[in-house]
Amino acid sequence: MHVIVLALLQGIVEFLPISSSGHLILVPALLGWPDQGLSFDIAVHFGTLAAVVVYFRRDLPRLIVAAFNARDPEFKFAWAIALASVPVGLAGLLLGDLVAGALRSPIVIAAATAGFGVLLWLADRYQRGQRREQELLLGQALLIGFAQALALIPGTSRSGITMTAGLALGLSRAAAARFSFLLSVPAIGMAASWEAYQLAAAPEPVAWGVLAIAALLSGATAFAAIAAFLRLIERIGMWSFAVYRVLLAGVIVYVLY
């Protein structure tokens, strides 16, 4: 039951701008469940990675080909995604121990959930641009990449901070979301690979059947969440997610303190 609930939760919140880490700390704390462990994190990461790859199955092969053809119209866009992925990789290598230790405090998660939620609302409230993600300059893509590195702070929300940066740079809501989701492919891939490396060095046994269920459930719900979000975001905006984040932060503080 723990695996089913947490895998479904992870799949739903991974690509919404509401902080998956906040939810995965709050729900077990509310229900008195033990920490789900590294192997579970790896399974759901691979599940959500599979979801975004399947959703963008037509775009990703085209972008890979474009990256090696300077005459391709999407050559610059392919390299914009690659360039924007560098900061989070470097930050993960340099600051991984800090993130895994001191920054996993519930008060840090609550503060990041609320603070970056307010920034998301401000970026959406004063957003006036309607640019497509393919119109991003390389420097602007790199700025979004630096914003993504902030998502190493638990509670920030990788999708939330990259959408905030995209909106601030003049992207439409849908374009900011699409760029965020495309950017998640290398980001989640790097995170899952690093976690898998850590797991390989650990002596703990692996329950492969349980992990397969977790990956399948998180992947299916993540795919549905991506599709629904991109279909509705231009109509509903970001304000509801920002309000939800502030409320979630209040609940985390109330329950855990």
Image (tube, grey):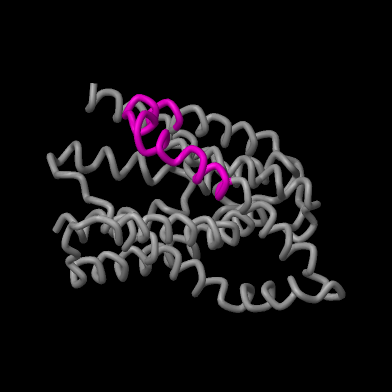
Query: Residue at 64% of width from left, 47% of height from top?
Result: 145
Viewer-nearest residue: 33 or 232: 33
Expressed as whole percent of the image width and height from the top left, the position of residue 148 reads 57, 44
Asked if residue 72 is positioned above or below residue 20 in the image, the reply reads below
Single out the residue that lies furthest toward the top. Answer: 257
In the image, residue 99 lies at what x, y percent? Answer: 41, 36
Q: Position of residue 238 (x, y in %)?
A: 55, 42
143 horizontally vs 38: left or right = right
Find out whether residue 203 is within the magenta segment: no
Q: Is residue 198 above or below residue 23?
A: below
Residue that lies at the very extreme toward the right in this rendered image: 71
The quadrant of the rendering that contains the N terminus is bottom left
Predominant SS of the magenta segment: helix
Is 142 on the left or on the right of 152, as rendered? right
Residue pictured at 49% horizontal, 58% vertical: 190
**Region in magenta:** 88-112
10 shown above or below 60: above
